[in-house]
């Protein structure tokens, strides 16, 4: 009888690992896409910040010239 219980337990473990593997694969794909999207957003934010700094400097230079 112990052999049947051991066999059943090992089969349940095998099926459970298979199910978990399938769920984890989907999560890994989602995490990968989220990471790439976050990286793209960081690059875009850095570009916009540098453009804002550039425009701020251009505006600062234009204001004294307009005051004269």
Image: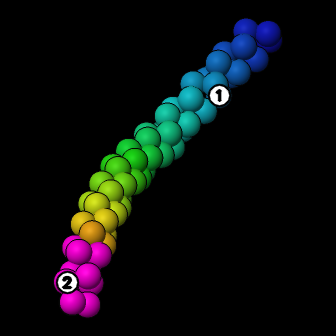
Q: Nearer the viewer, mark 1 or mark 2?
A: 2
Q: Is residue 26 left or right of residue 44?
A: right
Residue furthest out toward the top = 3
Tell me which residue sits at (55%, 37%) in the image. 20
Find residue 34 and report its horizontal and vertical position in percent: 41, 53
Earlier-in-chain disc, 1 versus 2: 1
Find residue 22 and report its horizontal and vertical position in percent: 47, 40
Residue count near mark 1 (Cα–Cα under 10 Å), binned few <14, some 14–19, many ≥20: few
Q: Could you say whether the residue bearing mark 2 is in a helix, strand or loop? A: helix
Magenta stretch, main secondary structure class = helix
Residue that label 2 marks: 65
Residue count near mark 2 (Cα–Cα under 10 Å), binned few <14, some 14–19, many ≥20: few
Residue furthest out toward the right = 1
Whether residue 33 is visible, yes or no, is: no
18 versus 63 height, above or below: above
Residue that label 1 marks: 12
Front in this rendered view, residue 35 or 61: 61
């Amino acid at each position: 009888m112990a052999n049947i219980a051991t066999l059943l337990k090992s089969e349940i473990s095998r099926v459970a690992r298979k199910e978990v593997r399938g769920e984890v694969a989907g999560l890994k794909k989602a995490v990968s896409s989220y990471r790439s999207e976050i990286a793209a957003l960081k690059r875009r934010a850095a570009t916009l910040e540098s453009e804002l700094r550039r425009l701020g400097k251009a505006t600062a230079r234009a204001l004294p010239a307009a005051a004269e």
